[in-house]
Image: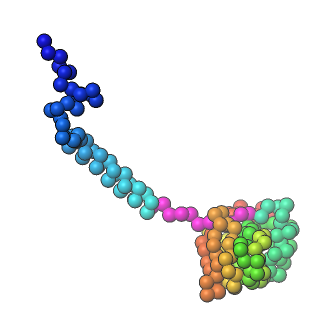
Amino acid sequence: MQNRYENESPRGRGAGPSSAGQSRKLPPLKVMLLFCTITLGLSAGWYLARQSGAAPPAIDRVNSADFDKAMTTLSPQALQEAKADPRECRLPMGFILAATPGNPAGGTVRFRTSRYESPPFVITDKPQRIAIPNPMPEVGVGLLSVEGDAKGLVVALTPPANMEPVNGAATTMVIFPVSPPCKS
């Protein structure tokens, strides 16, 4: 009686003389399933990437302990409005940090929203904390613009935004902290 494994090489079954020169092939059904899975995955990834745009950066809220210090960076008109109401709710504020990393000379800029224009600030490579009143406290989304000349200006929002003024201005959409209505 002949051993059925006699003609096989020590490498295992199917490596004997009868399979020499032949390569292993996947069955057509497995190839088609693999192709469909890869195609479906790529299509789903492309579709989801197009649907989910990045959210605009956010401005942090000035907490009540820092409110007095934040008011020193406001324009005279905004400062009057902030002092007029001790409840701190007529002028809800956020803050930004602005700096020109790698550019110690910096430059002079103003920050602007739809209802506010800051006084001019000389921004250098040392971060400055600047209060920005929320232009629409009930909505929470608006535009923040910078005007002036400061090479390499970075504004610390969440996430940070590179807002180097090109031709004197740069604008980005931001999320302001939403404020509840004031109570009398």
Q: Is residue 11 magenta?
A: no
Quarter-of-image position of residue 99: bottom right
Colouring used for the render: rainbow
Which span of residues is magenta-colored?
51-61
Q: Is residue 10 above or below residue 160?
A: above
Q: Is residue 38 left or right of residue 50?
A: left
Position of the N terminus, as image quadrant, is top left
Q: Is residue 53 magenta?
A: yes
- The answer to whether one can see residue 59 in this image is yes
Q: Is residue 16 left or right of residue 123?
A: left
Name the residue at the bottom extreme: 167
Quarter-of-image position of residue 93: bottom right
Identify the residue shown where x is 40% and y is 59%: 46
Name the residue at the left extreme: 1
The residue lying toward the viewer, choosing from 122 and 183, is 122
Q: Is residue 161 left or right of residue 22?
A: right
The residue lying toward the viewer, choosing from 150 and 168, is 150
- Tell me which secondary structure the magenta stretch mostly adopts: loop
Identify the residue shown where x is 71% and y is 74%: 102
Quarter-of-image position of residue 79: bottom right
The residue lying toward the viewer, choosing from 15 and 32, is 15
Identify the residue shown where x is 61% and y is 84%: 166
Position of the C terminus, as image quadrant, is bottom right
Q: Is residue 1 above or below residue 176?
A: above
Q: How many marks?
A: 0
The residue lying toward the viewer, choosing from 142 and 41, is 41
Identify the residue shown where x is 28% and y is 29%: 11
Residue 10, image x, y percentages:
27, 26
- The answer to whether one can see residue 175 in this image is no
Residue 23, image x, y percentages:
21, 41
Residue 125, image x, y percentages:
75, 74
